[in-house]
């Protein structure tokens, strides 16, 4: 009896595998050659930094300002509300919009003097990737990103030195602008 029941189990197992194989073949034969991709879950976009930049074509790079020097450097245009991370010759600069602080550095050349991973900004907001390069009116000036990934205009009644950007741009700035890196400020 033991032999016949093991033979039955083996036969049923073989039949089940054959049915599974056949169903798998049918499913693959009727599937489209290129199935549509699932829609990616996109996190909500941060608050707009500058409504005027929404019209710019992101596929076209924004030229580094003339008169901003040469070599590896960060270029910050106060008037354009934009930063360029200019790498070695032949590399395409990374550029992004920023929200200027209420206190601005004078045009000129600076070096990164200090950095902080996470701190509370002078406006009381948790920030990260702080890259300080100047002082003006007794206020430290530097690039940073709010931890909540918003980029609102600063309170005009307060003296602040944080030039804010999105967290992704803050990550790029943090990786690029190490201690003693050159920062050029243009009007």
Image (cartoon, rainbow, N blue to C red):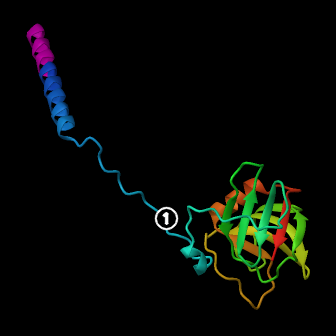
Q: Give the residue at the far right of this rendering.
A: 138
User: Which of the pair 38/158 is nearer the observer?
Assistant: 38
Q: Main secondary structure of the magenta part?
A: helix
Q: Quadrant of the N terminus?
A: top left
Residue 31: image location, x then y, percent: 21, 41
Q: Does the segment drawn in magenta span residue 5?
A: yes
User: Which of the pair 70/156 is nearer the observer?
Assistant: 70
Residue 181: image location, x then y, percent: 85, 57
Residue 83 in the image: above or below residue 92: below
Residue 176 lies in quadrant: bottom right
Q: For the point 13% across and 18% down, which residue is it? A: 9
Looking at the rendering, the stretch of residues picked out in magenta corresponds to 1-12
Residue 154 in the image: above or below residue 40: below
User: Which of the pair 51/175 is nearer the observer?
Assistant: 51
Query: According to the image, label 1 marks what residue?
Result: 43
Q: Horizontally, is 12 left or right of 173 in the view?
A: left
Q: Horizontally, is 85 left or right of 3 in the view?
A: right
Disc 1 secondary structure class: loop
Report the number of discs: 1
Residue 169 lies in quadrant: bottom right
């Amino acid at each position: 009896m033991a032999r016949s029941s093991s033979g039955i189990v083996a036969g049923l197992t073989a039949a089940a595998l054959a049915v599974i194989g056949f169903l798998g073949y049918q499913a693959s034969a009727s599937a489209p050659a290129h199935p549509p991709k699932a829609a990616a879950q996109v996190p909500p976009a941060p608050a707009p930094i500058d409504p005027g930049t929404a019209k710019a074509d992101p596929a076209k790079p924004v030229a580094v300002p003339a008169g901003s020097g040469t070599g590896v450097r960060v270029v910050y245009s106060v008037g354009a509300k934009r930063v360029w991370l200019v790498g070695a010759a032949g590399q395409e600069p990374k550029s992004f919009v920023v929200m200027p602080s209420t206190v601005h550095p004078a045009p000129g050349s600076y070096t990164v003097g200090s950095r902080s991973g996470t701190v509370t900004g002078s406006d009381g907001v948790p920030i990260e990737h702080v890259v300080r390069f100047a002082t003006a009116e007794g206020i430290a000036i530097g690039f940073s990103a709010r931890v909540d990934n918003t980029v609102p205009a600063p309170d005009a009644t307060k003296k602040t030195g944080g030039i804010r950007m999105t967290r992704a741009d803050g990550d790029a700035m943090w990786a690029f602008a190490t201690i003693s890196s050159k920062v050029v400020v243009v009007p």
